[in-house]
Amino acid sequence: MDLLQQLLQVSAQLFKHLSELPPDKERDDYLQITERLLDERGSIIEELQQLEVNPLPGHPFEKQLRELDERIRKRLKAQKDELSTDIKNLHLSKKSERSYVDPYVSVRVMDGSYFDGKK
């Protein structure tokens, strides 16, 4: 199979995979599959870059690959932003839970110590 055809096939699989966002419980498996597809795609791109002549310009798959790459980048960015938001919300909920359990953690007390400011 031609390298460009392999690249198109893996890119299409990745694009399809990125279009289906799983529930929170299945997110780890989803991210592992995404990482595997990205690694596979990256290795094909590296093989293409090692060739003496770039086969992409003028190839019938060129337009498809460029459009697919742009769409993949947009979906990856959107998912990264969503994951960042989820992580921030998780940190906020943990912080509010800690403040509920121990509301005086941020209050500094000297426990009966008296310091005279006039010396």
Image (cartoon, grey):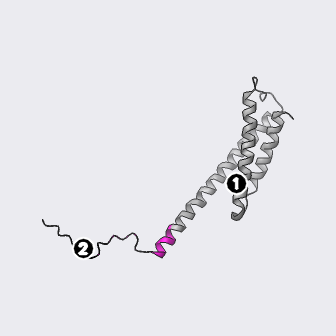
Viewer-nearest residue: 104 or 76: 104
What residue did someone put label 2 on? Answer: 113
Pointer 2 local density, CA inside 10 Å: few below 14, some 14–19, many at least 20: few
The image quadrant where one finds the N terminus is: top right
Q: Determine the residue positioned at 61% across, 53% down.
A: 81
Up-down: is 13 above or below 94? Answer: above
Between residue 116 and residue 87, name the one nearer to us: 116
- Residue drawn 55% across the image and 60% down it: 88
Q: Please tell me whether mark 1 sits on a helix, a strand or a loop.
A: helix
From this view, report whether residue 43 is shown above or below residue 97: above
Q: Quadrant of residue 44?
A: top right
Gap in Å between the C-alphas at discs 1 and 2? Answer: 54 Å
The label number, if any, that marks residue 108 in the structure image: none
Looking at the rendered structure, the kind of residue marked 1 is Leu
Residue at the spot 75% in from the left edge and 26% down from the top edge: 51
Residue 117 magenta-drawn?
yes
Q: Which residues are magenta?
A: 95-119
Residue pictured at 80% horizontal, 45% vertical? 12
Contact (Cβ within 8 Å) of mark 1 with mark 2: no
Please identify the dominant SS of the magenta region. Answer: loop
As for residue 79 lying within the magenta part, the answer is no
Question: The C terminus is located in which quarter?
Answer: bottom left
Is disc 2 placed on a helix, strand or loop? Answer: loop
Question: Looking at the picture, does residue 48 appear above or below residue 71?
Answer: above
Disc 1 target residue:
31
Percent position of residue 69, x then y: 73, 41
Amino acid on which the number 2 mark rests in the picture: Ser
- The single residue placed furthest to the left in the displayed view is 119
Q: Position of residue 79 (x, y in %)?
A: 66, 53
Q: Residue furthest top?
A: 52
